[in-house]
Amino acid sequence: MTRFLWPLIAFMILVMFLLVGLNLNPRKIPSPLIGKSAPHFQLQQLQELEKTFSSKDNLGKVWLLNVWASWCVSCREEHPLLIQLSKSKMVPIYGLNYKDKRDLALQWLNQFGDPYTASIMDSDGRIGIEYGVYGVPETYVIDKTGIIRYKQIGPITLDALEKTILPLVKELQG
Amino acid sequence: MNFLLLESLQSNFWQTVVSLKNSFHKKQFIMLLALIFMLPISWAKEATPVAEDPEIEKRMIALSEELRCLVCQNESLAGSRADFANDLRREIREQLKANKSDKEIISFLVARYGDFVLYRPPIKPTTMLLWFGPFILLATGTCVLIIYLKRRRKSFEEVSLSEKQLQQADILLKKNTDGDQI
């Protein structure tokens, strides 16, 4: 009896490891930037070219930085949620228009709606590298002192919004 | 275009085969074969140099071979054709031009993308299992094997033979060696 018990236990342990491994998402790589201050940038705004926006303009506010592009298909998936969120006025959303063409980006906002307080242009993706962007869309929650508190990789889901992002935003605002 | 060319070559080829049967155009046939085999050579082109400075390019490639492309995770930054990898290669190239050391560039990327960009992650508490897990498994496996083999040896009973049986065995063995000698 014990002859088969140990191999069976060993096998079960192996299966457990494999099961856990299969359920992990390899795309979700923990960002080393969480808990660190958001990399500084000062970029031209998408709509009003004469204006710039700097990451320091939002000190004292909790805000979201959403990385988007007109070529990004999953961005459309999260877009209705962002529109809702911006209507609720709970937290300002800033868009980082990542590696995009200006006319296409403007057209995209016209077509799907503009949830952003302002969008800034990162046409060559340099600020994206500073923020460790590797899969658009990505969303950063940045606190009053300019520290990144959370990073959503991939589209924001209703679940992530209600269970993680909004509670965190409220906590940081309070 | 090329396809059409091939097709016409092919039809030429068959015509030649047919004509070969009628009259033996050996020279033509060999020429045609040679042409067919030369086709790929004519398509090949000299690789165009990617950057002005081959030294920096060499260092960039050596560095990016050690780095993982986060978009296509099983490829290195050097081998990936993803747009993302292109951007990072550009970044590395620029930093090399700015006289940054390999170490500085790697820590720049690790600060932004985490240890995951490294194919050889550093040894620290969170990566202990990754580095030493296989050896622990190997050691455990060896121990289990040794214990198992020892136990198995004990389970064999010593077989005692009688005088008669030994003689019989001797005879059988002798027979065998005799047989071999013949």
Image (cartoon, coloured by chain):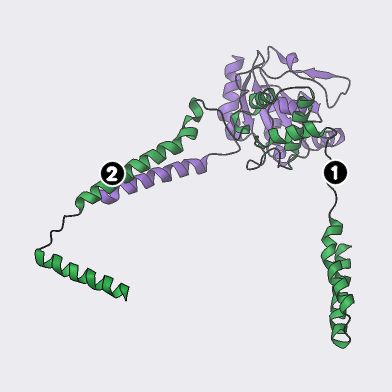
Residue B127 appears left or right of A94: left
Q: Determine crowd level at label 2: few under 14, some 14-19, many 20+ residues with C-alpha closer than 10 A.
A: few
- Considering the numbered disc 2 on the image, is that residue within a helix, a strand or a loop? helix
Q: Chain in green?
A: B
The residue sitting at 89% across, 81% down in the picture is B25
Query: In the image, is residue B37 above or below residue A158?
Result: below
Q: Residue pushed farthest front?
A: B181
Please tell me in which quadrant of the rendered image residue A107 appears. Answer: top right
Residue occupied by mark 2 = B147
Measured as percent of width and height from the top left, residue B179 is found at 29, 75
Say whether marks 2 and 1 touch (CB < 8 Å). no
For the C terminus of chain A, the quadrant is: top right
Q: Chain of mark 1?
A: B
Please tell me in which quadrant of the rendered image residue B34 appears. Answer: bottom right
Q: Is residue A136 visible?
A: no
Measured as percent of width and height from the top left, residue A114 is found at 77, 30
Kind of residue at disc 2:
Ile
Q: Nearer the viewer, residue A66 or B72?
A: B72
Chain A colour in the picture:
purple
Q: Chain of mark 2?
A: B
Measured as percent of width and height from the top left, residue A103 is found at 87, 35
Q: Nearer the viewer, residue B174 or A135?
A: B174
Q: Determine crowd level at label 1: few under 14, some 14-19, many 20+ residues with C-alpha closer than 10 A.
A: few
Q: Nearer the viewer, residue A156 or A52?
A: A52
Kind of residue at disc 1:
Thr
Residue occupied by mark 1 = B48
